[in-house]
Image (cartoon, grey):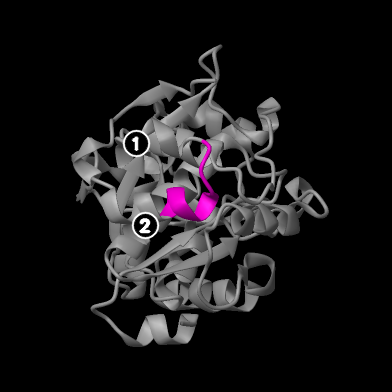
């Protein structure tokens, strides 16, 4: 099955895994990969892989290929070609122009320091933009970024694990950036365009992105896209309480065919009752068990320390 077939069948579940190639696959990313794969395959759907390599300074040479090899060795096979965000800037520009024509964007001349100084308060993800450039740039100011105007409305959605979530964008984040001062397209815009154009209707990812979801739902409405179903999984924490990530020196998942201990650990981390005897089974056997037996209601909420 390829990506085009997935987009043609609206009733088909289309899931995806979208790692950043800033290093090798680590346990926290494997949890998201396993959860998204099992839920998509259990529904008889397809599973896509997207490499989120827009932020070139953070890309580690060879990391994308290493991640793909590790997924294959874990028995997590994707449908269709791998999508690379770095090759899709024309699609993000087209979406930006649509929003511009609709009168939803404005140029902002504020630096990060100025946004912090003028913020009415600090929200979930940092200082809330105070709207200094919303009515136009002050005389002598040069545009740095492009922001989208957000309404004074509540964005509400039902997450598959965390239940009903609500967020008022203007008080939590304010008008947010879609094209950065360095010319790069913002993650929020790229992910919305990619999911819509790939036919993704089931987004399974880490709970660290839960606060980003209202912004993405808002952008989807502005661009005329249907929102996917969202399922956010618990974050894997190191023993010191920090999120497991490449930037914090997380140990890589070894690309070792037939070795499934990491898969077994990921399923256990997600609250699944995978049998002890599968701990040293072949990867394909553990994945097959996960697809057949995964129970979404058993997935815990919150943040969890990853065992051993």
Instruction: Find residue 203 and name its label.
Output: 2
Q: Main secondary structure of the magenta part?
A: helix
**Mark toward the viewer: 1 or 2:** 2
Q: CA distance from mark 1 to mark 2?
A: 23 Å
Question: In the image, is 157 to the left or to the right of 137?
Answer: left
- The residue most toward the right is 61
Q: In the image, is residue 105 above or below residue 60? A: below
Q: Which residue is mark 1?
A: 172
Q: Position of residue 105 (x, y in %)?
A: 46, 64
Mark 1 element type: helix
Dot 1 crowding, Cα within 10 Å, few <14, some 14–19, many 20+? some
Question: Residue 116 colored magenta?
Answer: no
Q: From the image, which quarter does the C terminus lie in?
A: top right
**Number of numbered discs visible in the structure rendering:** 2
For image coordinates 44% across by 48% down, the residue present is: 286
Question: In the image, is 78 to the left or to the right of 225?
Answer: right
Question: In the image, is 183 to the left or to the right of 199?
Answer: right
Q: In the image, is residue 91 above or below residue 264? A: below
Front residue of 166/268: it is 268
* Magenta segment: 280-287
Q: In the image, is residue 240 above or below residue 69? A: above
Q: Position of residue 210 (x, y in %)?
A: 36, 41
Circles 1 and 2, Cβ within 8 Å, touching? The answer is no
Front residue of 218/159: it is 159
Front residue of 301/195: it is 301
Q: Position of residue 162 (x, y in %)?
A: 23, 38
Mark 2 element type: strand
Residue 300 in view in this figure: yes
Question: Residue 282 colored magenta?
Answer: yes
């Amino acid at each position: 099955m390829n990506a085009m077939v997935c987009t043609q069948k609206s009733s088909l579940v289309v899931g995806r895994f979208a790692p950043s190639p800033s290093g090798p696959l680590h346990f926290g990313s494997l949890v998201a990969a396993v959860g998204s794969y099992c839920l998509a395959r259990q529904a008889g759907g397809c599973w896509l892989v997207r490499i989120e390599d827009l932020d070139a300074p953070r890309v580690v040479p060879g990391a994308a290929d290493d991640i793909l090899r590790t997924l294959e060795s874990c028995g997590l096979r994707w449908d269709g070609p791998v999508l690379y965000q770095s090759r899709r800037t024309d699609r993000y520009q087209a979406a930006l122009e649509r929003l511009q024509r609709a009168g939803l964007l404005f140029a902002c001349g504020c630096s990060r320091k100025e946004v912090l100084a003028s913020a009415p308060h600090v929200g979930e993800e940092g200082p809330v933009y105070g709207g200094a450039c919303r009515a136009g740039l002050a005389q002598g100011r040069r545009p740095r970024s492009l922001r989208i105007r957000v309404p004074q409305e509540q964005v509400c959605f039902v997450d598959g694990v965390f239940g009903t979530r609500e967020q008022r964008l203007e008080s939590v984040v304010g008008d947010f950036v879609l094209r950065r001062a360095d010319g790069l397209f913002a993650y929020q815009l790229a992910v919305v365009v990619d999911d819509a154009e790939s036919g993704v209707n089931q987004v399974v990812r880490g709970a660290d992105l839960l606060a980003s979801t209202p912004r993405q739902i808002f952008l989807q409405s502005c661009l005329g896209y249907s929102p996917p179903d969202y399922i956010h999984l618990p974050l894997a924490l190191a023993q010191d309480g920090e999120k497991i990530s490449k930037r914090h020196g997380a140990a890589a998942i070894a690309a070792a065919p037939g070795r499934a201990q990491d898969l077994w650990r990921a399923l256990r981390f997600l609250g699944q009752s995978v049998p002890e005897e599968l701990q040293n089974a072949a990867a394909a056997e553990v994945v097959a068990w996960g697809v057949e037996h995964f129970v979404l209601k058993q997935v815990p909420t919150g943040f969890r320390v990853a065992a051993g």
